[in-house]
Image: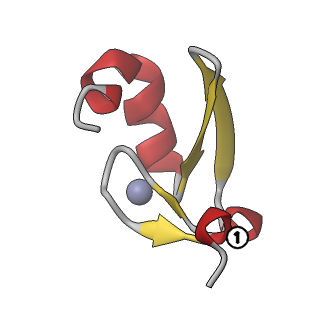
Amino acid sequence: MHKNNTHRDPVCGKKMNPNKSHAKIKYGGEIYYLCCPLCQSEFEKEPQKYIKQN
Ligand SMILES: [Zn+2]
């Protein structure tokens, strides 16, 4: 397994392949992958809220 092949959606916690993600958002020097338009808009509204969960 390649550790970098899966990324976690910070909003819903779903793990996914970055190639299959809905959106890629760069924030605070990190790249976050979102699975759907809903997660993307949630993340864009309050990115800090979701980043702190890590
Ligand atoms: Zn999601």
Q: Is residue 32 above or below residue 22?
A: above
Residue drawn 22% across the image and 35% down it? 53
Q: Picture coordinates of residue 23 (x, y %)?
A: 66, 47
Q: In this view, does 40 lie above or below 37?
A: above
- Dot 1, how many residues are within 10 Å of its Cα: few (below 14), some (14-19), or many (20+)? few
35 or 18: nearer the viewer: 18
Specify the quadrant of the image occupied by residue 29.
top right
Q: In this view, does 54 lie above or below 49?
A: below
Tell me the kind of residue under disc 1: Lys
Q: In the current view of this chain or complex, which residue is farthest to the right?
A: 19
Q: In the current view of this chain or complex, which residue is farthest to the bottom?
A: 1
Q: Helix or strand or loop: what does disc 1 sit on?
A: helix
Q: Is mark 1 within 8 Å of ligand 1?
A: no
Residue drawn 51% across the image and 40% down it? 40
Q: Picture coordinates of residue 51 (x, y %)?
A: 35, 28
Q: Picture coordinates of residue 14 (x, y %)?
A: 38, 66
Ligand 1 quarter of the rendering: bottom left
Specify the quadrant of the image occupied by residue 8.
bottom left
Q: Picture coordinates of residue 28 (x, y %)?
A: 56, 14
**The N terminus: image quadrant:** bottom right
Give the labeled residue for mark 1. Answer: 20
Residue drawn 44% across the image and 53% down it? 9
